[in-house]
Amino acid sequence: MKHYFSRIVVKVGSNVLARPDGTPDVTRMSALVDQIAGLHRMGIEVILVSSGAVASGRSELHPVRKLDCVDQRQLFSAVGQVKLINRYYELFREYGITVAQVLTMKESFATRRHYLNQKNCMAVMLENGVLPVVNENDTIAVSELMFTDNDELSGLIASMMDAQALLILTNVDGIFDGPPSLPSSQVIREIRSGEDISGCIQTARSGFGRGGMLTKTGIARKVADEGIAVFIANGRRENVLTEILKYEALRMEQNAPALPDPPFAYTRFVPAARSVSGVKKWIAHSEGFAKGAIYLNSQAAELLLSDKAVSVLPVGVVAVGGEFEKDDIVRILHADGTPIGVGKTNFSSAEVREAAGKHGKKPVVHYDYLYME
């Protein structure tokens, strides 16, 4: 099989890896490992973002007292993560592939230094033929500092590691144009930047995961806008990874009219033609780390939203929210609170307040460190 992706991120959801009773579906794990090992042999670098630790731990334990949701996650993940990574270790070892466990937290992406440290660590693994298995460190994470789910984490990893594709495997065939339970609903095969599909998204969450299709769509859009192809597919389909990559290789070789239908339905988010810089990729996923906000007047907001490469200047600032220091991430908002973007500030909140509305001052947020939502 000819391939066009040299590095991909595969995210496997809890509902793909767990049976209805919460115990690991070893047959499904084994089938996914078989496919990933095949891609590895072809020279494709794979980073696996795997859910399933909490579900694995839950099936092993019967707590002696009623636990709150944070205590449950911490206890179940501590036990389940051992079980999960050990299973992957044994399965990949049959193919001579070494795996490495990468446990991370939202805080680890909050500063540029920590972000680059993680990137370098995983780059060294890939360089040495090691396959990273990534998961959130639920053992020490608390609710307000957790990722929305592993979809958010996988998007961040794909962006950080300059992957060409992100494959999100879930328990449905993709994004439907109506409720998936209705026979009349069809999978949306392709979604382009700016296309409004809000009326199609179901807000229900999956049984063992904590995210839903709304989260997946938001992450997929952001990652695709950075020039990375994103696919949402049913992880329980036979040879799902192999078949998608085979079909995408065919897509790149042939003109659309001559292209046959894929072997099964899945949703593809069309990547932007031009990728963004590494710094902007970090900033694009850093809204959750924002320390404060900068509010702009309508003229400054319109200029930012135009096609011009424009920085945030003090003259357009009407208010400052929260307290922050130089180099912190801040939200950029309209005066009425409508989001515009997010960026790395050149000044502290006190300095921005002092300079607000004044001409002839240096940019508060330079264009190179600004991501428009």
Image (spheres, helix red, strand yellow):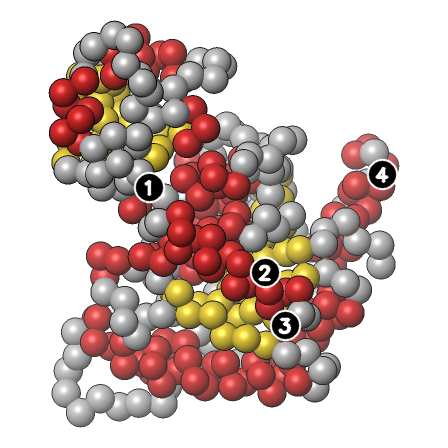
Residue 226: x and y in percent read 55, 38
Badge 3 is on which residue?
130
Residue 340 against residue 34 in the figure, above or below: above
Q: CA distance from mark 1 to mark 2?
A: 25 Å
Name the residue nearer the viewer: 221 or 312.
312
Q: CA distance from mark 4 to mark 3?
A: 34 Å
Q: CA distance from mark 3 to mark 2?
A: 10 Å
Looking at the image, is mark 3 or mark 2 earlier in the sequence?
Answer: 2
Q: CA distance from mark 2 to mark 4?
A: 33 Å
Residue 186: x and y in percent read 57, 45
User: Left or right of 69: which side holds 47?
Assistant: right
> What's under tag 3, amino acid-wise?
Val
For the point 23% across and 61% down, the residue is 143
> What's under tag 1, amino acid-wise?
Glu
Crowding at mark 2 (Cα within 10 Å: few <14, some 14-19, many 20+): some
Looking at the image, is mark 1 or mark 2 earlier in the sequence?
Answer: 2
Looking at the image, is mark 2 or mark 4 earlier in the sequence?
Answer: 2
Check disc 1 and report its element: helix, strand or loop: helix
| Residue 33 location, quadrant | bottom right
Q: Depth-wise, is mark 4 or mark 3 nearer the camera?
A: 3
Residue 243 against residue 301 in the figure, above or below: below
Q: Which mark is residue 287?
A: 1
Looking at the image, is mark 1 or mark 3 earlier in the sequence?
Answer: 3
Q: Quadrant of the N terminus?
A: bottom right
Q: Are marks 2 and 4 in contact (CB under 8 Å)?
A: no
Q: Which mark is residue 123?
A: 2
For the point 35% across and 33% down, the residue is 343
